[in-house]
Amino acid sequence: MSSRTAERVPVRRAARWLARLEAVAPMIRLGMLTMTGLSTALVALSSYGLSQYALPLVATTAVAGIAFTWLFTEGGVYNQKNRDKKDLGDNFASPLMRIDDELIGSAVFAAIHGRPPDEDEQAAIAEAVERPWREHRDGVEVDG
């Protein structure tokens, strides 16, 4: 059976670099969007003969970026966004959870009884997991 992960060294290294790029992608996009906006604004100021406002605009953008970063992270917005995203995105019972719950049930049985469950006991564990899993398959109500 395959491990479902890259086994060749070049592929593993490429995957690691892709993960690094994916991790910084939101910051790169935000920086590029800011630079595009600033560039457009500076060209507009220059076109209208208002070049004297270029430096204050750049300074204000930098200060606003720093303030936004601090408020977003330290003000709790980042944590709340992640919590809401998790509630909205993982608010259901996935097949992986179904498999995991049955494995945990079997492990708990083995820990209590000192042996793995036989076929009938395994079927009982699977049945006990099935009903609540189906009930939560489409998600649960989360107060917003």
Image (cartoon, rainbow, N blue to C red):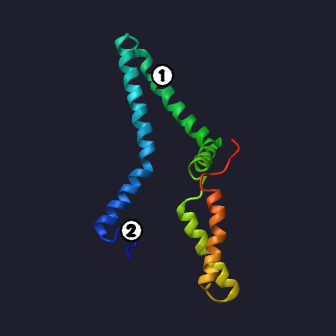
- Tag 1 secondary structure: helix
Q: Position of residue 95 (x, y in %)?
A: 53, 62
Residue name at image x 44 percent, y 17 percent: 53
Q: Report x, y in % for residue 35.
A: 39, 31
Q: Which residue is depicted at the point 66% across and 62% down?
A: 132
- Compared across the picture, whether 134 is left or right of 42 comes to right
Residue 117 in the image: above or below residue 2: below
Q: Where in the figure is residue 104, as x and y percent of width and height?
A: 62, 74
Location of the N terminus by quadrant is bottom left
Kind of residue at badge 1? Pro
Q: Quadrant of residue 111?
A: bottom right
Work out whether residue 105 can be spotted.
no
- Left or right of residue 108: residue 51: left
Q: Is residue 138 visible?
A: yes
Q: Is 75 placed above or below 117 here? A: above
Query: CA gap, disc 2 to disc 1?
Result: 51 Å
In the foreground, 43 or 132: 132
Q: Badge 1, how many Cα within 10 Å: few under 14, some, many 20+? A: few
Question: Height in image: 44 above or below 96?
Answer: above
* Residue beneath disc 1: 56
**Occupied quadrant, residue 123:** bottom right
Q: Give SS at disc 2.
A: loop
Report the residue marked by disc 2. Answer: 5
